[in-house]
């Protein structure tokens, strides 16, 4: 009986998490945050000299960035809404005025990541990769990201 109650509680908690995660505004913000953690938090810090070059860390970061970018792109097909609660940034309504341009930037991002994720051999390579991909991130942010 006690065991059943515990299982029931776990099920309810699990269902709650599933509901929270199915909000595209939260999900896409989570993917952006994940990209930021790896890209700005690890790679760009190395490129700037704020963290030592760590090849294993570089090799770990790119697949995570690539996966998050792939997950984020389709999540912007949902209506604009209010943006994710507690997010530092919200998506601009301009996204849905020129969705083709916005979507094309995700395609450009995927290509930039594919072209640069192999540049892991030296700090100079990381700098080049961060420069090339970072340009795509900030190009989209300048146009479509709104500070809360
Ligand atoms: C196609 C457009 C686009 C591209 C490309 C893009 N982003 Fe974003 N990003 C956004 C938008 C829109 C937001 C606003 C927050 C949201 O949508 O939830 C955002 C927000 C963010 C945030 C802030 C999250 C928060 O609220 O705390 C980070 C960090 C971030 N992006 C990282 C990245 C990185 C790193 C890249 C490149 C590897 C990247 N983004 C590429 C559109 C883009």
Image (cartoon, rainbow, N blue to C red):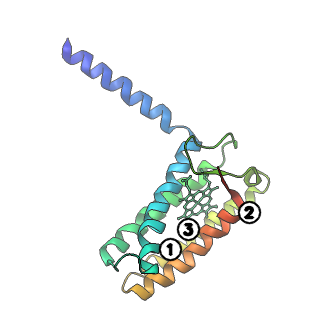
One can see residue 140 in this view: yes
- Residue extending furthest toward the right: 97
Across and down, in percent, residue 119 comes to 43, 82
Quarter of the image with the N terminus is top left
Across and down, in percent, residue 32 comes to 53, 56
Across and down, in percent, residue 112 comes to 56, 74
Which label's residue is closer to the chain start, 2 or 1? 2
Is ligand 1 within 8 Å of the beta carbon of the residue shown at mark 2? no
Residue under label 3, please give it.
110
Q: Residue at (58%, 43%) from the top-left corner?
A: 84
Residue under label 1, please give it.
114
One can see residue 108 in this view: no
Which label's residue is closer to the chain start, 2 or 3? 2
How far is mark 3 from mark 1, CA to CA? Answer: 6 Å
Across and down, in percent, residue 72 comes to 55, 54
Mark 1 surroundings within 10 Å by alpha-carbon count, few (fewer than 14), some (14 through 19), many (20 or more)? some
In the image, residue 23 above or below residue 129: above
Mark 2 surroundings within 10 Å by alpha-carbon count, few (fewer than 14), some (14 through 19), many (20 or more)? few
How far is mark 2 from mark 1, CA to CA? Answer: 20 Å
- Residue extending furthest toward the top: 1
Instruction: Give the image quadrant in which the ligand numbered 1 is located.
Output: bottom right
Q: Residue at (47%, 83%) from the top-left corner?
A: 127
Asked which secondary structure carries label 3, the reply is: helix
Q: Name the side, left or right, on which 50 lies relative to 128.
A: left
């Amino acid at each position: 009986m006690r065991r059943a109650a515990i299982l029931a509680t776990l099920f309810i908690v699990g269902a709650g998490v599933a509901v929270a995660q199915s909000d595209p505004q939260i999900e896409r913000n989570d993917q952006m945050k994940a990209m930021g953690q790896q890209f700005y938090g690890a790679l760009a810090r190395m490129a700037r000299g704020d963290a030592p070059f760590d090849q294993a860390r570089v090799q770990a970061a790119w697949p995570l960035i690539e996966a998050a970018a792939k997950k984020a792109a389709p999540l912007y097909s949902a209506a604009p809404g209010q943006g994710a609660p507690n997010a530092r940034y919200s998506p601009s309504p301009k996204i849905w005025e020129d969705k083709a341009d916005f979507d094309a930037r995700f395609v450009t991002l995927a290509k930039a990541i594919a072209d640069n994720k192999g540049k892991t051999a030296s700090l100079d390579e990381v700098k080049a990769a961060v420069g090339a991909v970072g340009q795509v991130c900030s190009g989209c942010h300048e146009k479509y990201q709104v500070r809360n």
